[in-house]
Amino acid sequence: MDIKAAEERIKYLSDTLKYHNKKYYIEDSPEISDFEYDAMLRELENLEDEYPQLRKEDSPTQMVGGAALKLFTPVEHTVKMESLRDVFSFDELRSFAEKIDTSKTAFSVEPKIDGLSVSLEYRDGLFFRGSTRGDGVTGEDVTANLLQIKSIPKAIAFDGELEVRGEVYMPRDSFYKLVEKQELTGETPAKNPRNAAAGSLRQKNSKITAERGLDIFVFNIQRITGKTFETHIETLDFVKSLGFHTLPTYKRCADIEEAVEEVKRIGLSRGNLPYDIDGAVIKADNLALREEMGSTAKYPKWAAAFKFPPEEKETVLKNIEINVGRTGALTPTAEFDPIQLAGTSVSRATLHNEDFITSKGICIGDTIVVRKAGDIIPEVLNVVKHADGATPYKMPRFCPSCGSPVTREADEAVLRCTNADCPAQLLRHLIHFTSRDAMDIEGLGPAALEQLLNAGLIHNIDDLYSLDYGKVAQLERTGEKTVENLKNAIEKSKENDVARLIFAFGIRHIGNKAAALLAEHFGDIDAVLAAEVSDFEAIDGFGSVLAESAAEFFALPETKAMIERLKALGVNMKSLKEVKDTRFAGMTFVLTGTLPTYSRNEAAAIIESFGGKTSSSVSKKTTYVLAGDEAGSKLDKANKLGITVIDETEFNNMIK
């Protein structure tokens, strides 16, 4: 490869890796496997070694992948939180060891937990701050959320200053529960425990973090006062004695061959662990030698991470099962002869969507390759051999649950059932209908709704308003007080603004704001039912996608019948919105940051009560940006465009 070709390839790899760094570290939504990412990074490293004049300071090989989010207060790390050099073979591991003076040190070997790296700081025995790694130099203050992790000690028997580094992770059981809940509520399920852990720790609301079942393993002392150690293993024994969760297994190995055997043992055990690991970490155990060896711009020279490759196996496709989600999406799942992957038996895997099946020409009876993405979610990769005489599988054109026709929009890869009353969607519809932002029926969570469904007490949404409370009282764990509270909550929900009801219907593309616009524009549900597509398009803030989705839903006979039943049961069908005056008429506000006293929803409601409207993005049409603490890119854009920025005090003066 000549230098021009190398320069072009280096640029491509750098740009691609930076994009995937953002998806992985910042958005917690990776698009490629760790194995694919590592292969690109290794290629870039090799090219930069061959052409060092082409290596740039901001190359992914020179920087830790993450960055501090503006959502949280930045924390400057006293000790840099470095990344690790990856190795992919035992020969590479031996080469790493050759650069270490083994006459001065043994090796420590421990599993590499697949989670989110954090720093925990203690002063005078008390936990006072916790932060994410970020870019290694600056992280995010997530103390409030870390306090929700029960295994992090709030006080320790050590009077000096102590900073330890650990990996926050989500146990597999917690991950499965989260995915199940997300699927029931129509959310996009987390891809793997690592991303679920990262997303949970970066919640603005620490109550959500508390619900996610996170845990932590502490694996390093970053700094300590009043105490010294000779080896890394000693430090792990010390933090364990203070009550920190350390890795269940960490071992001192006399030489690199013993370390190789320990890495092999860890690899064989990973399928039986209750949490994810993606490799093993090998370090020089002698702390003085570490200090002497130092680090590169990105990695310590005394440590390496052995990365396990994703395991792939062949099997025979026996059947394709179609599942129907809350939004009516038809999801294909492969069923095949059981295989062992990452230590567990697997007999089902996702086939993603219709386009994937078509592009691979998948047929029942084919020999397929399956792997566990992130060692958790089984997925079909490709077809090795087509079965003799087999024909490509075709997705059904009618819903397998209710028999209604399915549709596919031009810009989507999924097929959807057109029947709002489809039994397969019922539980998910009910969960959404009763949720806080919809009809807000307290006491009707997923478990309670499933209990009512299993008992045959509800068969559709309007059955909620004609419940036989005598039969409800006979259900397990349902006392007299519970029934009374449930009845009051259901009766109270009848008085909601029709905007809540419209949102509760779960119409595709129609969120809270669009539902409020419909209610405000038409005034009541009868006017909505009588509207044509052009009437919906006339609403300020409604595009063609929203208009067509609303028109299609309200034109369905099933929708009209359901609304008539709800009317008869006393559910409010009118807009209750009051406009105090029109002082904000024609004005558009953008809200950003955290306001001292108002939530964003409360501030938006006030603006709308004075005839104004809110938008999620800043443009030249924006009248004011109402900014609170930790305002981010929206504030920057407002300043660039010369938009007037106000704080809560100025806002309160405007609404007096």
Image: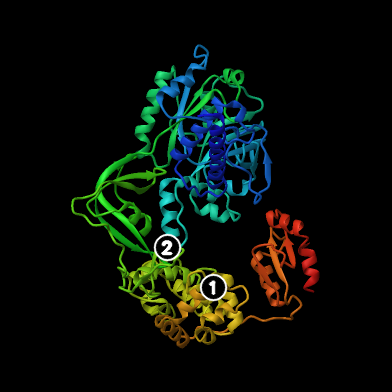
Q: Secondary structure at mark 2?
A: helix
- x then y, percent, for residue 56: 63, 33
Q: Quadrant of residue 565?
A: bottom left
Per the image, the residue denoted by label 1 is: 544
- x then y, percent, for residue 120: 60, 38
For residue 24, above or below residue 78: below
- x then y, percent, for residue 45: 53, 30
| Towards the viewer: 484 or 574 | 574
Mark 2 → mark 1, Cα distance in angstroms: 28 Å
| Towards the viewer: 504 or 65 | 65
Q: Amino acid at mark 2?
A: Leu
Outermost residue on the left side: it is 388
The disc placed on residue 184 is 2
Can residue 9 be seen here? The reply is: yes
Circles 2 and 1: CB atoms closer than 8 Å:
no
- x then y, percent, for residue 67: 62, 43
For residue 319, above or below residue 41: below
Q: Amino acid at mark 1?
A: Ser
Residue at horizontal 70%, vertical 77%?
Answer: 611
Residue at horizontal 36%, vertical 54%?
Answer: 356
Considering only order in the chain, which callout, 1 or 2, is on the residue closer to the N terminus? Answer: 2
Left-right relation of 74 to 290: right
| Towards the viewer: 654 or 442 | 654
